[in-house]
Image: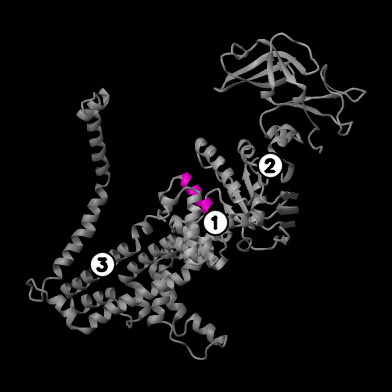
């Protein structure tokens, strides 16, 4: 063993102490850079959520109790709300995949500059107000709305069809709003698929359809899973669109929370709903991470 | 084992020649391929060699079916392929980027073409094992692609390209991503593999040394046209155009004058008594640096040797050889190389020294001027 290596182990080379001090100082400075963000998270996420969590365990008599959670199990209406929430979220996600996959594929095969232009078309609605977009759909879809007028004058159907204030309207609006969240990660993962991959598949004997299913689709899956999860989770807590386009017939958890607060002013019951939704979301994400290798999907590794 | 040997020999006998005629590919106003005629013989190793943008990759992609030429014909054996989609051409290909499928293991990658051909599971497993053994990766079948080194990926790509026993194998600069040592080792291995498989192979490279090392024949391509097709020996020793002489190996070019009797001279050196090409044309003398030798005493031409004299302008020591340039009457530069062993006559050479360089008359190369063929 050389003398230099021995002293390295003994950690008494002339510069080592200063280097260690410098290294530690650097780490503290890096940590201090993230303090504003950490503070913000504590103030606007951890404390309110903790407060809600606490409230959910306070009964109507002001004492600690499981009353709010027991009610949720007792009354069938709560189960229906959760069922509707997951149903709407799942259907919206499926709709987004159905519309978004071909769209992302189209964008991915375009030359970069053209793709940028069409991407604007996807993103433009994204930058306008959520409320504006939702009411725009109301105008389009309502009984005497543009769509019904057009369809009737074109003779597609005779009397106005109910397109809004129900599940259909909610899904149309939600899918439109959520689409960019699916398209963006999906487009990203498709862009990363080299053209040589498809050439190789076809050179090895795969017809275009086989090449798509055996090579392209599996390689785009990571982006699709990431996008679908984002859409699904965002849908679970969505309020505006189901409230406006559902017209009171599509009661999701967020709408139910508002109703409880407005009608009964019951913070405990409302908090309990929020807590259950949060826990359900965490469980879903955890399962997805376990079974779909989410880390790879979210951090862009194939 | 006998059955394998039988398979091998039947493969060899079904290696296909490629006949390319009048192949033209236009991008806007630019001809990537300009009426190319090329015969690739059955079972030979032919290299397409040219600078980047010369059209060599376009030609390979046309053989693979990834681009559609605007005119011309590509036949594999007797079968016209020009309109056949790539997945029905049944040619193996090694891509520059390897293009291995990252969502499949090594063995799954190699089994991919067999699965598409509905080879049954048992035979498929045998052939994958055999192919991996051929490229010396038997132990790595279960690995995922991102666990492999560059050299290992290259071998997997190779195994995947020949496992389905194509009658034609195409390679697009497969070694360009490897470091020098590994590249040189793989060149020899690829050559042996070609001998073993006996498959018609078209190899694309811009590396002239690689082309000279591996090929049965080389097709030098420039500006979408074939400049010369021939064995490495012929390409190096009888370049047909100034481009080929310049692109392959190192060379100096000296202009030649013709006297009334048709004899060719460089300044007052008689270079050749006659030259068959168009008597009106200006020709050049091509000299390979390693064919020149330093002369101490003789200073006039003899029957065997042409002697050039001048001043050393540049001297660079490069390890196994030294490279130098001599200036002839301040007008022409002559590059030369010599060994650096202790007995070498050039060891004490300094810029400014007056020296003489000899060239054996058998090493004289005369080429027509640019544009003439």
Query: Along the line of sight, which residue is nearer the eye, A272 or B353?
Result: B353
- Give the spatial CA distance, label 1 vs label 3: 59 Å
Q: Is residue B372 above or below residue B349?
A: below
The chain containing the residue under callout 3 comes to: A
Residue that extends furthest to the bottom in the rendered view of this protein: A158
- Same chain? Circles 2 and 3: no
From the top left corner, tell me how far across and down residue A41 is, in percent: 24, 55
Residue B153 sits inside the magenta stretch: yes
- Find residue A128 and report its image quarter: bottom left
Name the mark on residue B218: 2
From the top left corner, tell me how far across and down residue A258 is, in percent: 25, 75
Task: Say whether residue B334 is visible.
Answer: yes
- Give the spatial CA distance, label 2 vs label 3: 63 Å
Name the residue carrying label 1: B2
Residue that extends furthest to the right in the rendered view of this protein: B260
Q: Is residue B196 above or below residue A81?
A: above
Name the residue carrying label 3: A283
């Amino acid at each position: 063993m050389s003398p230099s290596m021995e002293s390295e182990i003994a950690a008494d080379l002339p510069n080592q102490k200063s280097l260690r001090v410098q290294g530690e100082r650097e780490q503290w400075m890096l940590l201090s850079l993230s303090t504003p963000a950490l503070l913000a998270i504590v103030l606007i996420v951890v404390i309110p959520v903790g407060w809600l969590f606490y409230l959910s365990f306070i009964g109507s008599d002001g004492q600690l109790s499981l009353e709010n959670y027991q009610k949720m199990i007792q009354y069938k209406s709560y189960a229906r709300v959760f069922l509707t929430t997951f149903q709407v979220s799942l259907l919206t996600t499926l709709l987004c995949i159905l519309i978004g996959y071909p769209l992302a594929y189209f964008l991915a095969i375009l030359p970069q500059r053209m793709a940028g232009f069409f991407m604007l078309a996807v993103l433009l609605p994204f930058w306008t107000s959520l409320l504006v977009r939702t009411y725009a759909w109301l105008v389009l879809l309502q009984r005497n709305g543009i769509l019904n007028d057009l369809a009737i004058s074109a003779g597609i159907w005779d009397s106005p069809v109910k397109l809004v204030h129900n599940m259909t309207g909610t899904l149309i609006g939600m899918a439109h709003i959520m689409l960019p969240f699916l398209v963006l990660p999906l487009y990203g993962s498709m862009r990363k698929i080299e053209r040589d991959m498809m050439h190789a598949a076809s050179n090895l004997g795969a017809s275009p359809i086989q090449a798509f299913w055996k090579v392209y689709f599996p390689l785009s899956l990571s982006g699709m899973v990431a996008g679908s999860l984002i859409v699904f989770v965002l849908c679970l807590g969505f309020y505006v669109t189901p409230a406006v386009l559902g017209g009171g017939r599509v009661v999701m958890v967020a709408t139910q929370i508002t109703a409880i607060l407005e009608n009964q002013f019951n913070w405990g019951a409302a908090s309990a709903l929020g807590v259950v939704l949060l826990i359900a979301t965490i469980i879903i994400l955890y399962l997805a991470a376990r079974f779909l290798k989410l880390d790879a999907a979210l951090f862009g590794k194939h | 084992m006998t059955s394998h040997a039988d398979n091998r020999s039947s493969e060899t006998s079904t290696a296909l020649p490629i006949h390319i005629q009048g192949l033209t590919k236009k991008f806007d106003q630019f001809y990537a391929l300009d009426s190319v005629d090329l015969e690739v013989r059955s079972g030979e190793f032919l290299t397409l060699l040219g600078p980047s943008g010369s059209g060599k990759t376009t030609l390979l992609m046309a053989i693979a079916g990834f681009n559609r030429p605007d005119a011309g014909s590509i036949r594999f054996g007797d079968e016209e392929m020009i309109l056949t989609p790539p997945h029905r051409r049944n040619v193996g290909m090694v891509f520059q980027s390897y293009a291995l499928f990252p969502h499949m293991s090594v063995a799954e990658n190699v089994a991919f073409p067999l699965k598409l051909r509905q080879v049954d599971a048992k035979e498929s497993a045998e052939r994958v094992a055999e192919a991996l053994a051929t490229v010396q990766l038997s132990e790595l079948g279960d690995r995922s692609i991102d666990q492999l080194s560059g050299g290992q990926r290259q071998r997997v790509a190779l195994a995947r390209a020949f496992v389905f026993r194509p009658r034609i194998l195409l390679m697009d600069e497969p070694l360009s991503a490897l470091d020098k040592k590994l590249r040189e080792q793989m060149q020899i291995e690829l050559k042996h593999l070609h001998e073993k498989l006996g498959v018609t192979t078209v190899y694309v490279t811009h590396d002239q040394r690689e082309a000279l090392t591996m090929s049965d024949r080389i097709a030098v391509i420039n500006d979408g046209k074939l400049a010369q097709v021939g064995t490495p020996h012929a390409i190096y020793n009888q370049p047909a155009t100034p481009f080929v002489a310049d692109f392959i190996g190192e060379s100096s070019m000296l202009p030649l004058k013709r006297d009334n009797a048709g004899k060719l001279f460089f300044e007052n050196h008689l270079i050749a008594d006659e030259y068959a090409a168009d008597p009106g044309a200006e020709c050049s003398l091509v000299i390979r640096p390693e064919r020149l030798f330093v002369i101490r005493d003789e200073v006039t031409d003899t029957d065997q040797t042409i002697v050039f004299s001048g001043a050393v302008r540049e001297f660079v020591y490069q390890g196994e050889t030294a490279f130098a340039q001599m200036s002839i009457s301040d007008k022409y530069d002559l590059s030369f190389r010599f060994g650096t062993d202790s007995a070498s006559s050039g060891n004490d050479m300094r810029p400014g020294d007056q020296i003489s360089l000899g060239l054996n008359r058998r090493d004289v190369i005369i080429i027509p001027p640019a544009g003439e063929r």
